[in-house]
Amino acid sequence: MKKYRGYPPKFFLRFFRWYCHPKMQDYIEGDLMEVYDARLKTLGKRKADIKFIVDVILLFRPSIIRPTKGNQNLNTYGMYRSYFKVGWRNLMRNKGYAAINIGGLALGMSVALLIGLWIFDELSFNKYHKNYDRIARVMFHSTYNGELGTTQWMPFPLGPELDRSFQDDFDHVVMSTFPEGHVISYDDKKFSQQGQFMQSTAPEMLTLHMVKGTRTGLMNMNSILLSESSSIALFGEEDPINRVLKIDNRMDVKVTGVYEDLPKNSQFNELKFIAPWDLYVTSNGWLKRFLESWNDGMIQVLVQVRQQSDMEKISQKIKSVIHDHDTEENRIHNKEAFLQPMNKWHLYEEFKNGKNVGGQIQFVWLFGIIGLFVLLLACINFMNLSTARSTRRAKEVGIRKAVGSQRSQLVNQFFSESILIAILAFTVSITVVLVVLPWFNEVANKQIALPKANALFWISCVAFTLFTGIVAGSYPAIYLSSFIPVAVLKGTFRAGRYASLPRQILVILQFTVSVSLMIGTMIVYQQIQYTKNRPVGYNRDQLVYLNTATTDIYDHFEAVRTELITSRTILEMTESSSTMTQDYQANFGGFQWKGKDPDLTDVFGVSWVMPEYGKTVAWQFLDGRDFSREIPSDQSGMIINESAAKYMKLENPIGEIVMLEGHPFTILGVVKDMVVGSPYETTRQAIYMALRWPGNVVTLKLNPSKVTHEALTEIQSVFNKYAPAVPFDYNFADEQYANKFSNEVRIGKLTSLFAGLAILISGLGLFGLASFMAEQRKKEIGIRKIMGASVASLWRMLSKDFVVLVILSCAIATPLTYFFMSGWLQRYEYRMEITWFVFVFAGAGTLIVTLLIVSYQAVRAALANPVKSLRYE
Amino acid sequence: MKKYQLGEFEELVILTVGILHNEAYGVSIKNEIESRLSRTVSMGALHAALKRMEDKGYLKSFAGETTEERAGRPKRYFEITALGKKAMLYAKTTRDELWSAIPKAVFQVNIAG
């Protein structure tokens, strides 16, 4: 029977084919056709068509419509997943190798992270102050005896002058004292606190965060702003506002505000209180003669420039402000004022010959370079281990290439493996950093926290991890993906004679860096030790000093001294204008003596001391005699040091008359140079004159026959009797002297830490490499043994390669470090000579460590039973 | 919670697949439901339900023969999987439990009313 065959409306059929999911299209269309066919027979064409259209439209629903993207995976996500999976399996199969790789990389990354945090902290110095890019301090260069010097000690009239003549350029001009210890007392509580007297707009300029009160708190002359910590120390939980305190037991001030303590990375970190400038001027009468003098540097002048103004231009503008006001005879110094912006205070502190030569920034660079190198060492480990093991992966590479991998895909594969390792290492290193950070802060004297809430930090961490992964994976990826599949799969693949050359170069690079760091650290330590052993010219044992700030001890000096000496608590006691361990009280000139070069602008360090000073500190006389209380004319005597005698070019200085401001002084004696300022500098010419007003520094030589803490309590009770307002904050001279080294010791500690880690990382890499080499040559060793090679000769054979590399790197590192470290030593006037001993020691040390590492593997391989290694052939 | 998701229409379809046993494909299922329940079933609703249940794992399918009236397109036969059977049983027992929980009085009142 011949069927009548109708056909459904073409347009809708095509529409259906267009939208339907290709997997379902066939059989749904079949169903549609079957139904249509049946309907055609029973209902006729028109109705069947209409029902067909309805069906097609009703089929147009999400579960049947084809997905817009098609049904193929168009991304290579699956491939990458496979790369990571293969990488993970490779790690799991060789756990020791994985541990060396990840551990080494994690160590390197921890060092880099720590250094990164440290650098970030250094660079963010002073950023606490909101207007920090507009704040500056005024400084000037001046020429003395042909030498260009730079100072931030400004004369008094500069402040008002800047305010008056340049008011369009500055938002604020703030005169301030330099930070100084003062006694703050309330009721019976008293503390020595670092503080500054500043003009009233200082809190506004420094954008202090006020906890209580407002930034305008210094308007009234008798007011004070306290830091939160000093407020708590004085008042505990009580409200400090409007309480009345005493500064140095003589200035009454009312607390008008409390500000949040300034963070450690602010120049004003030590600022525990701020008192009004006017109070400073009015309560120190002796300042009167300096108020109008343009020649005496006494204060600090801070400015904040107007918004959008150029600091350079303003610097140019104020260039001659001091010079113009100088007296005729002082104009020869040619003082040239300029602004040093706040963002340079910390990192670019040093000036030489009128040029800003840097300062702390050197260490930022130094540590930055060290961090980069340590990271590089860890990356080299990864490269060496992966390429050394290349024969293991060669077949895989061959098969992948044979089934159609392109080289770029293999490169991608090895990169994803190294990134996988970098990610694992990063998780380890961030834990390490978290654990080590408190300790690191202590060593580095910092307050660094991981900025966990900072998105930028995490972004840079991701970038850092990717960077490490890519650097570490770059060489292996290129090397491993270059294998020729035919050679590899046939088994004729041989790492050529020069295949290990790049690896050897990398090992040399590693050890050159490690040895250099080690030598550098040793030289830093030697220099510190050398300076510590420098003869200081006085005896600092059992020497205690304290700042008194009031005149009470001076007024009762004889009574206090007699009481303490008769009780056998001390041997001697004295008062002076400055401490042994600080700088001189003043640097000034204007002395006249016989035979003085008329062109010389003389400068001496000057201290004023009581006659007992010499006995207390035990200075050593080269010539002449000490001050004596019995001889009244000693009041106009002076004692000079050795350098001063040379400086003054006096053949026989004793008895010479020196004129100062019209008064004659006789030179009584010459003492050996004493180390007063920085122990790294040569001692300067110094003059000691008789103290005729309160000196504020009391120095005591304890009686060694008495237990120290007993002596101290006794001194305290006597001091409390005569000077109740003075807190008994004593310092040991030897401790204070040791503090002078703290910066160098800190740097030494940090570099030795990093050097140690660098050596550890290199050693780890060497260990991995040696174990791999020993394993690879297992059969060779077996055969050699059977042929009669001794363990010693095998050991020599296996160790030789590495030892040669290490000796080569020592040879490279020696001149390199010699060059750099002599440059570093140039910064110190008092410095040691670099001896050959350091290089020999470092070289021998590295060689021994290398031998130990390599020998362990070599001896193990040499002792192995040849039957085991040869059994399978 | 919902252990086995089975909508009302899905339940009808899966039951019909069971009835047709080895003969269940699109048109036969449609015809079976239409004749037994005297309601029309749209092709769209049916295929959507079949696909959904196949995705859930209640049904599996295989390609079958072609016939002339299908214009050469293959049939696709559906079978209930073990999971599908569980789902059906679960649906049935929950219904039965609900049925048995209804007090007899409900129906008596209805008859009386």
Image: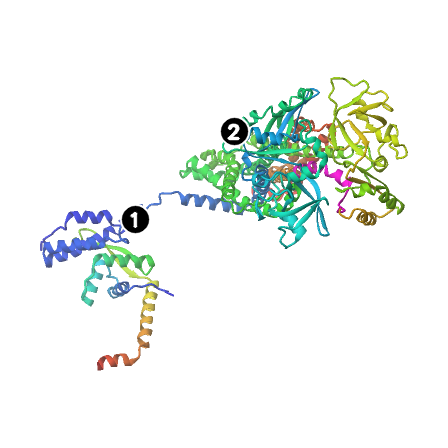
The magenta stretch is A726-751
* In the image: residue B78, left or right of residue A459: left
| Residue at point 66%, 35% (across, down) | A799
| Residue at point 48%, 39% (across, down) | A415
Say if B63 sits above or below A365 in the image: below
Say if A305 sits above or below A44 in the image: above
* In the image: residue A693, left or right of residue A761: right
Residue A765: image quadrant is top right
* In the image: residue B68, left or right of residue A849: left
Dominant SS type (magenta)? helix
Task: Tell me the amino acid under the disc marked 2.
Answer: Asp
Residue matched to label 2: A310
Q: Nearer the viewer, residue A193 or A825?
A: A193
Q: Locate residue A750, reporting x and y percent.
A: 66, 39
Where disc 1 sits, the SS reads loop
Q: Nearer the viewer, residue A144 or A515?
A: A144
Colouring rule applied to residues: rainbow
Q: Nearer the viewer, residue A391 or A274?
A: A274
Where disc 2 sits, the SS reads loop
Residue matched to label 1: A67
